[in-house]
Amino acid sequence: MQAELDGDLDLTMATMSPDPHLNHVPVCAGGSGAPAVRDFYDQHLVGQFFPPDVQFDNVSRTVDDHQIVDEIVISFTHTRSIDFMLPGVPPTGKRIEAAFVVIVGVADGKVTHEHIYWDQASVLVQIGLLDPTGLPVTGAEQARLVLDPTLNYRTEY
């Protein structure tokens, strides 16, 4: 991930197997095969990852011989286009706090795949594109609850 943040496309790709795939599940963005993954990273991710005020809060990590699973809360102000997460949505200036699960497959010391999950409805509520009234969705509360399970849980539906 550091290579992605640093904007180093070649180093990012050097961490990958010969035939990786990447799936940002909520928006079906990514690619399959090294050329498609490289293109996605180049056009939408490396060097464009998040706005400067991004904060990563690691919640948990599970590792075995074949994969790493990270649970992370990512917080930032939507001050730039973030195509991999909000394709076609111009910057709103709104604060976003979202819980992510990142599953990274590993074989022979290289990344075989990344499956990245987050609640897109929560993100859309936070930037004002989805009205949560009458819907079973929340905004930043869900990320905050992941970080602090002593907060109040929703009790009415």
Image (cartoon, rainbow, N blue to C red):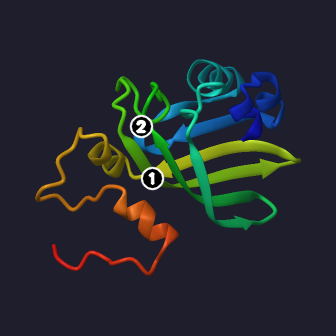
Vertical comparison of 68 with 107: above or below: below
Which quadrant of the rendered structure holds the C terminus? bottom left
Q: Is residue 11 left or right of residue 59?
A: right
Residue displayed at 42% across by 44% down: 26
Residue displayed at 32% across by 77% down: 153
Residue displayed at 80% across by 23% down: 10
Which residue is labeled 1 in the image?
Answer: 98
Give the mark toward the camera: 2 or 1: 1
Of residues 98 and 75, the one nearer the viewer is 75
Task: Choose top left, top right, bottom left or bottom right for residue 39.
Answer: top right
Number of residues whose C-alpha sits closer than 10 Å to that of mark 1, classed few (under 14), some (14–19) or many (20 or more) = many
Q: Amino acid at mark 2?
A: Val
Q: Position of residue 21 (x, y in %)?
A: 64, 36
Residue displayed at 45% across by 39% down: 77
Q: Is residue 80 left or right of residue 134?
A: right
Numbered circle sitting on residue 27: 2
